[in-house]
Image (cartoon, grey):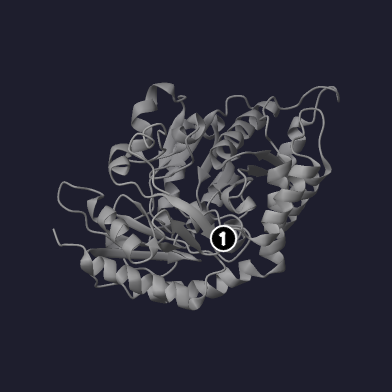
């Protein structure tokens, strides 16, 4: 199906070079399993599981059937002062999968909403405990925490922030990011260098005083900025410092949650217990928007004061715990656990590591990083033209049967958990051909 140039004008596309796209449109018309079909009939392998959100592949029968049944049974239910049973069961199920059975789950509709909710919980928690001076939030350079004002404020990607600084709250600081190409280029898994960077939090505590700091938020693995893997001991050290100073630690697991590292959550993979965990994307296999926050029981209990008929937390969304999203989430968890797909992701991870690092020495490649079933190939930019090399690889990849994602000059890879070994090897070999085909500067 082709669209006329006029028909392409009405949609202002997100995070897209709209003028370039509308001059060179690339349209998806169908998806099945690990593949998309483009409007011109080409079938391309989904190298990033949609947008990190379709680990089961597309049109998984269990998810499709669950949503179809649900829309006929209960298409919408209000969740202010009333609920529906499946949402409570889903919350308990997510908490158990995370190994946090006593946690509570607050449902939202996206990763951005999950982050802003977690930040609001953190600020309100300290206030509920009589520490209203704890209002400062600490994020990290190069972090992506969605596009809500809270998430933008603690985020650390300059291009996302620069137009909106006047809207951002005060009282935000940032830790340094943990990527040093000199010290960790071509590392497989976690780098040995960089644990000391967590001690920058002690510097911020000394600067601002612990009594002013509410929470630290980090992605266990920084995904959208190019798969930056945490140094060994780094996350553990952050946990130690936060505990010592009464600061809440938030893991943003919108990307890593639900199996990408071969465990249900990255917190389990790294053996670190944050106070709050955000999740989204894979919880419904991307079929219906949903997100949420896992909240420690002691944080929840701090709100449960005052008259029992009074609202404890003035926050929520019309579509929190939407019945269709809940149905998709139950079916997605059925597949992840019942079909052993989290374990499959863990089993495929060494293959992706070997294959991806086999691109070392290819044209343009200056670094390769990986952890779990995700990897990144960083490319040397053309002088004065950031992003152009990766764009050319992206365009070439479509002709090679791949849909890749690029951020700046980084090619990000996170194939579906249902991928075969041959598909992953073929993906890397096709990417190799693309790299060789793109001209040198």
Marker count (numbered) = 1
Give 330 or 45, whichever is nearer the viewer.
45
Give 269 or 47, whichever is nearer the viewer.
47
In the rendered image, is residue 204 in sight?
A: yes
Q: Residue 323 at x, y = what percent?
A: 74, 41
Please report the residue visible at 74 percent of the width from the left and 39 percent of the height from the top. 75
70 lies left or right of 382: right
Please report the residue visible at 41 percent of the width from the left and 55 percent of the height from the top. 196
Give 237 or 407, whichever is nearer the viewer.
407
The extreme right residue here reads 308
Give 425 or 175, whichever is nearer the viewer.
425
Q: Residue 186 at x, y = what percent?
A: 33, 68
6 lies left or right of 109: left
Quarter holding the C terminus is bottom left
In the rendered image, is residue 205 in sight?
A: no
Say above or below: 216 vs 433.
above
Q: Residue 409 at x, y = what percent?
A: 29, 54
Q: Give the crowd class for mark 1: few <14, some 14-19, many >=20 residues within 10 Å.
A: many
Residue 182 occupies quadrant: bottom left
Q: Secondary structure at mark 1?
A: loop
Say above or below: 289 vs 129.
below
Q: Which residue is mark 1?
A: 55
Please report the residue visible at 47 percent of the width from the left and 35 percent of the height from the top. 147
Say above or below: 164 vs 36.
above
223 lies left or right of 123: left
Please report the residue visible at 38 percent of the width from the left and 49 percent of the height from the top. 177
Q: Residue 363 at x, y = what percent?
A: 21, 68
């Amino acid at each position: 199906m082709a669209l006329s140039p006029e028909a392409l004008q009405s949609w202002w596309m997100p995070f897209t070079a709209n003028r370039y796209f509308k001059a060179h449109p690339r349209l998806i018309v169908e998806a099945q399993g690990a593949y998309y079909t483009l409007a011109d009939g080409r079938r391309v392998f989904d190298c990033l599981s949609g947008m990190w959100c379709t680990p089961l592949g597309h049109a998984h029968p269990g998810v499709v059937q669950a949503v179809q049944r649900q829309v006929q049974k209960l298409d919408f239910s209000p969740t202010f002062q009333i609920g529906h049973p499946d949402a409570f069961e889903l919350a308990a199920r997510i908490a158990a999968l995370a190994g946090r059975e006593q946690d509570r789950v607050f449902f939202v509709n996206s990763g951005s909403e999950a982050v802003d909710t977690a930040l609001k919980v953190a600020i309100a928690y300290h206030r509920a405990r009589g520490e209203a001076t704890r209002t400062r939030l600490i994020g990290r350079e190069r972090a992506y925490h969605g596009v809500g004002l809270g998430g933008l404020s603690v985020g650390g990607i300059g291009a996302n922030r620069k137009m909106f600084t006047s809207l951002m709250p005060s009282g935000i600081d940032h830790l340094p990011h943990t990527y040093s190409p000199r010290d960790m280029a071509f590392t497989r898994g976690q780098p040995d260098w960089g644990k000391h960077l967590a001690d920058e939090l002690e510097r911020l505590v000394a600067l601002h005083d612990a009594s002013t700091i509410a929470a630290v938020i980090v992605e266990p693995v920084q995904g959208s900025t190019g798969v930056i893997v945490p140094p060994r001991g780094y996350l553990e050290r952050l946990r130690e410092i936060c505990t010592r100073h009464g600061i809440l630690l938030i893991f943003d697991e919108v990307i890593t949650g639900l199996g990408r590292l071969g465990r249900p959550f990255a917190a389990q993979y790294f053996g670190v217990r944050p106070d709050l965990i955000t999740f989204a994307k894979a919880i419904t296999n991307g079929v219906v928007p949903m997100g949420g926050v896992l909240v420690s029981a002691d944080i929840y209990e701090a709100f449960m004061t005052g008259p029992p008929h009074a609202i404890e937390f003035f926050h929520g969304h019309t579509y929190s715990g939407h019945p269709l999203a809940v149905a998709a989430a139950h079916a997605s968890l059925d597949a992840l656990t019942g079909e052993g797909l989290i374990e499959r992701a863990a089993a495929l991870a060494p293959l992706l590591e070997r294959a991806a690092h086999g691109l070392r020495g290819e044209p343009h490649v200056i670094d390769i990083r990986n952890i779990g079933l995700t990897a990144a190939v960083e490319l040397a930019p053309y002088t004065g033209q950031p992003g152009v090399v990766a764009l050319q690889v992206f365009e070439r990849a479509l002709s090679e049967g791949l849909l890749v994602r690029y951020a700046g000059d980084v090619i990000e890879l996170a194939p579906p958990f249902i991928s075969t070994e041959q598909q992953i090897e073929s993906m890397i070999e096709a990417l190799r051909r693309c790299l060789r085909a793109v001209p040198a500067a």
